[in-house]
Image (cartoon, helix red, strand yellow):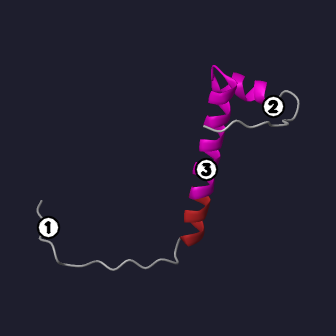
Amino acid sequence: MNRITLNLPEGLLETVMELSGASGKTETIVAALRAYETALRRERLQTLRGQVRLLATQDREVRS
């Protein structure tokens, strides 16, 4: 794990900690970064919507 120094807006970390119910600063920041990563990935996938063409193959027998 890396150590890092951050300059955050006053009260932002405490507000997010309170809203999320996180118990510590590290947990709060990690959760926030993971949520941001998820949002960015979702956004990237949305830009591909309608641009990717999938081809279905009949190689496998479908069983119900």
Q: Nearer the viewer, mark 3 or mark 1?
A: 3
**Cα gap from disc 3 to disc 1, whole angstroms:** 36 Å
Q: Which residue is mark 1?
A: 62
Residue flagged by tag 1: what amino acid is it? Val
Say if the magenta span includes residue 23. yes
Residue matched to label 3:
37
Look at the numbered disc 2 and give the secondary structure of its residue: helix
Amino acid type at mark 3: Glu
Q: Amino acid at mark 2?
A: Leu
The image quadrant that residue 32 belongs to is top right
State the image coordinates of residue 57 (x, y, percent, origin top left).
24, 79
For label 2, count other residues whose C-alpha is less than 10 Å away and answer few (under 14), some (14-19) or many (20+).
few
The crowding category of the residue bearing disc 1, from other C-alpha atoms within 10 Å (few below 14, some 14 to 19, many at least 20), is few
Q: Which mark sits nearer the N-terminus, 3 or 1?
A: 3
Q: CA distance from mark 1 to mark 2?
A: 53 Å
Task: Write the start and end of the magenta stretch as one range.
Answer: 12-41
x then y, percent, for residue 49 = 53, 70
Is 33 on the left-hand or right-hand side of 60?
Answer: right
Q: Report which quarter residue 1 is drawn in.
A: top right
